[in-house]
Amino acid sequence: MSVPIRLDGETVGQLGINYKHLEYSNKGAISISDFLNSIALDFGDWLQRSKLRDIEAAYLGDVKMTERAINEHAIIAITDSRGKIQYVNQKFCEVSKYSTEELIGEDHRIINSGYHPRDFFLNLWSTISKGEIWKGEIRNRAKDGSFYWVDTTIIPLLDERGSPYQYVAIRTEVTAHKKLEAKMEEQVAELARSNDELEQFAYVVTHDLQEPLRAITSFVQLLKKYCNDQLDERANDLISHAVAGANRMQMLIDDLLTYAQVNASQTMTDIDCDHLLSNVLIDLSIIIDECEATVTCDKLPVIKGIPFQFVQLFTNLINNALKFKRAEPPRIHVGVGDNQNEWIFSVTDNGIGIEAQYIDRIFRVFQRLHSRKEYSGTGIGLAICKKVVEHHGGRIWVESEPNAGSSFYFSIPK
């Protein structure tokens, strides 16, 4: 005979028995089938309990592993509705330097550093007492007097009426991060101060150099005027070189002054880029005609910015396209694209282009890729462009191919 063994309503096996039929006087009182079914039922119950024990053991194992992982990272505390500590994990004791016995029954005032104002904790309690989760950073004080920061999440546990009866606080220590953050803020402030001093120094120096340089230029020109008949060709050449050098120095000073003034506090206004570009092209009309250049443009948007700085930006980029030309007449196009939260402007030319190894250098101050005999300039123009764009929250870059032209791109937030 055999009967099924069932577990959770499913047949998982069979209980079978072989027996020899015997004649005996009370055989009517014995039911082999009922006997086997009883055994099979008991065996199924035993398997069920065994399975539950295995599941429980596995679950407890997982819970212990999870608890161990959490204890390695998180600081955990459970308080009652009044804020009295009922449970803390090992990490809480490790960071606060208090033992479990010292913490249980206390509230979190035991680790209050006095750093946060009273309103900070009033807001915290107001939030969690309404059954809402609170998140924030708190500076606490350990038993040894040292301070530490924790990124905290407090979760209310609610009863059947929706009222908090316990609070679970999960914290992550972020002391190192806060120290690094404070150090970075100090460095940024120091950098800003140094930058302001440097800009002020550059402004003062360039401004103070203007007068003596003009005087030198005037004196050399007067020398040439009054002594022209007494000077030979060599002397006249030297005077011409001196005047040219003084003029280059004047250009350099003017560009340095412009560069130093880019970050100066000025009010941003609406700029009609179409109108602004038209004025720039009028200012450059003589050199455009001399180069027989063609300048085209898209319909440009209205943006927020400092008008004078955008005049400098467009002037320098178009000037570069006119300066670094090939034998054929320059073709320049000023374009714009809409990229969600920013405008992407472009100034594209058909000039000599830039070799790949020099692209990272061209936006630095005083970086020249050619001699002054080949191309004039101070090496500051593109540095001014970069500073203007970044001052307006954008970025600037270039794509170029030697002997095929360049495309300068810059973004301006909407």
Image (spheres, helix red, strand yellow):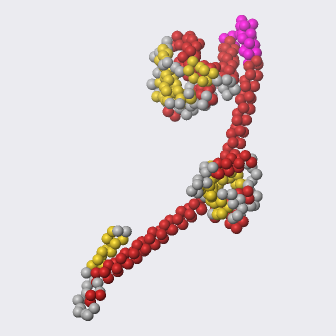
**Residue 357 location in percent, x, y?**
52, 34
Looking at the image, which is closer to me, 268 or 241? 268
Q: Quadrant of residue 166?
A: bottom right
**Residue 75 location in percent, x, y?**
63, 59
Q: Which residues are magenta?
A: 213-235
Asked if residue 99 shows in the view, the reply is no
Q: Quadrant of residue 32?
A: bottom left
Please, is residue 321 above or below residue 156 in the view?
above
Q: Which residue is most to the top?
A: 229
Q: Is residue 206 left or right of residue 281?
A: right
Please, is residue 25 above or below residue 244 in the view?
below
Asked if residue 127 shows in the view, the reply is yes
**Residue 296 location in percent, x, y?**
48, 16
Looking at the image, which is closer to me, 401 or 133? 133
Looking at the image, which is closer to me, 219 or 254? 254
Tell me which residue sits at (68%, 15%) in the image.
Answer: 243
Tell me which residue sits at (48%, 19%) in the image.
Answer: 298
Task: Tell me if residue 232 is in the magenta stretch.
Answer: yes
Task: Tell me if residue 55 is in the magenta stretch.
Answer: no
Q: Is residue 146 left or right of residue 380?
A: right
Q: Is residue 253 left or right of residue 61?
A: right
